[in-house]
Amino acid sequence: MPTEIKVPTLGESVTTATVGKWLKQPGEAVKEDEPVVELETDKVSVEVPAPAAGRLENHAVKEGDEVEVGAVLALLEAGAAGKAAAPAAQPAPAQAAPAPKAEAAPPTETDYDVVVIGAGPGGYVCAIRAAQLGFRVACVEKRATLGGTCLNVGCIPSKALLQSSENYHAAGHDFAAHGVLIDSVKLDLAKMQARKADIVGANVKGVEFLFKKNGITWLKGHGKIEGTGRLSVDGKPVTARHIIIASGSDSANLPGIEVDEKVIVTSTGALELSEVPKRLVVIGGGVIGLELGSVWHRLGAEVTVVEFLDRLVPGTDNEVAAQFQKLLTKQGFKMKLGHKVTKAEKTKKGVVLSIEPSAGGTVETLESDVVLVAVGRTAASKNMGLEEAGIALDKRGRVEVDAHYATNVPGIYAIGDVIAGPMLAHKAEEEGVALAELLAGQAGHVNYDAIPGVIYTWPEVASVGFTEEQLKDKGVAYKTGKFPFLANGRARALGMTDGFVKVLADKQTDRVLGVHIIGPAAGELIAEATMAIEFGASAEDIGRVCHAHPTLSEAVKEAALGADNRAINI
């Protein structure tokens, strides 16, 4: 009985194909797994193999016909001999070349050229750039929406609440100084949260539009790597020439503290509170804790920060961190630095925390309505088949990669929070672009000395390059230029004079090594400094560029001039 050769599964959401070219003619002998016909879709080109050895009886469809998945393409008389195909022309012998490194080869025909696991900033940007470069691309995402943590429960919703809470606080405390008198300021938290949700919705739908625009297939479900060229999505097999892990990170937890996202929350739960807590304890004096602490403090909560170290925001310039702590304390934040939480007990009224000095000592209790656990994030590398596939992880669960983001398993790469480096959305984006370009044979590259960091509190804190402490540790001779916003005309007009700009430059060459800003619009001002470091500019280069007057950016110019003791307005 003849064997039917049918249209195979062609990939997620692909139900039809066009018969491109018959590779075998009726009467010809074929070997098992030998390609018989080539099918084409708008996303993939597939050669359909013979399921067994035999003789091709007939073509059931013609070249150019449109066929559905499962349709019969041809009949094969299994085991029968047939006429031999004309021998193919043989290429001229080539000179001997060194044997390539032995690698497990992906399937010769794949569903996609590139499959990215994770649709956060690193993943979706990588997918878009790969599609722009001509790859057939799919992106695996288990969330109901694209955008990952950043767009759904991280960067975007937190900035929406930060802006709304800043407006609320300014209306009640700052507008009067401008002659704007408001008798009563009321908070509609439900409306504030609805606005945040609308902003999130617009952003995630924007990513979905970009996927459609660039022809990227969204594979909805949980991705698991099986090995080189192979993965599964909710158990369904998918093949790809290149697999990119962009799974991001998860909130880190503390032992013995049970998060319920109601009274003991991570950043996710802190974004969804339906009422302002009277007392909020933030465990962790890093970026996330201070940003979300600022939101609820502005809306009326009494905020206490418990930090294991004796300072806030580790890794930032010491002088900036000290000024930052001073200004937050002035705003009303309470600080328990150099302390650790040893126990969290839920009560009918909230949570009772047991805290003690980090080095050990007398235990004290701290009562709170809501506790925010913000002690950092961990790489999301579990339950993805990484270890089973032989992919190397470091002690912190991060995927180990080389300078080109390749893992130790051929054809598998990783970017973003799941690898070493700062857990920043824009760092992941740059890595995604670089990797896509490397896969296309281009010179993708990320300068890790020019990755800016921003804390969106009030005042904002932004930095790029090296801190003074890092330069001292490296033994680099440097000079400093500093300029306060108090001496900036635009800052005075805004009524926002707290903070300063600090420029660090090489003492011999004047090359900019680091810039640190605390003050108004620091997150915007840092872009100029990042550009300067990226292009190897000197402090004098920044100082000689004409800056519009009056603007906050003049503070950057003045600080750069100050590195050579040439500041004009101080």
Image (spheres, helix red, strand yellow):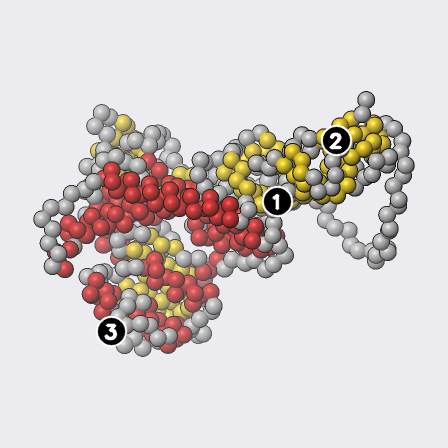
User: What amino acid type should be assigned to the residue bearing mark 1?
Assistant: Asp
The one of 24 and 406 positioned closer to us in this rendering: 24
Q: Residues within 10 Å of mark 3 (few under 14, many from 20)?
A: few
Q: Position of residue 304 (x, y in %)?
A: 24, 42
Q: Nearer the viewer, mark 3 or mark 2?
A: 2
Q: Position of residue 531 (x, y in %)?
A: 43, 65
Is 530 positioned to the left or the right of 280 in the image?
A: right
The one of 201 and 28 positioned closer to us in this rendering: 28
Residue 405 versus residue 260 in the image, above or below? below
User: What amino acid type should be assigned to the residue bearing mark 2?
Assistant: Ile
Q: Quadrant of the N terminus?
A: top right
Q: Quadrant of the C terminus?
A: bottom left
Q: Secondary structure at mark 3?
A: loop
Point out the tag, 3 or 1, that comes first from the N-terminus: 1
Is 443 positioned to the left or the right of 476 in the image?
A: right
Q: Position of residue 267 (x, y in %)?
A: 34, 39
Q: Secondary structure at mark 2?
A: strand
Residue annotated with mark 3: 570
Point out the tag, 3 or 2, that comes first from the N-terminus: 2
The one of 208 and 286 positioned closer to us in this rendering: 208
Q: Secondary structure at mark 1?
A: loop
Residue at (47, 68) in percent of width and height: 535
Residue 118 seen = yes
Q: Which mark is residue 42?
A: 1
Point out the tag, 1 or 2, that comes first from the N-terminus: 2
Residue annotated with mark 2: 5
Residue at (36, 51) in percent of width and height: 314
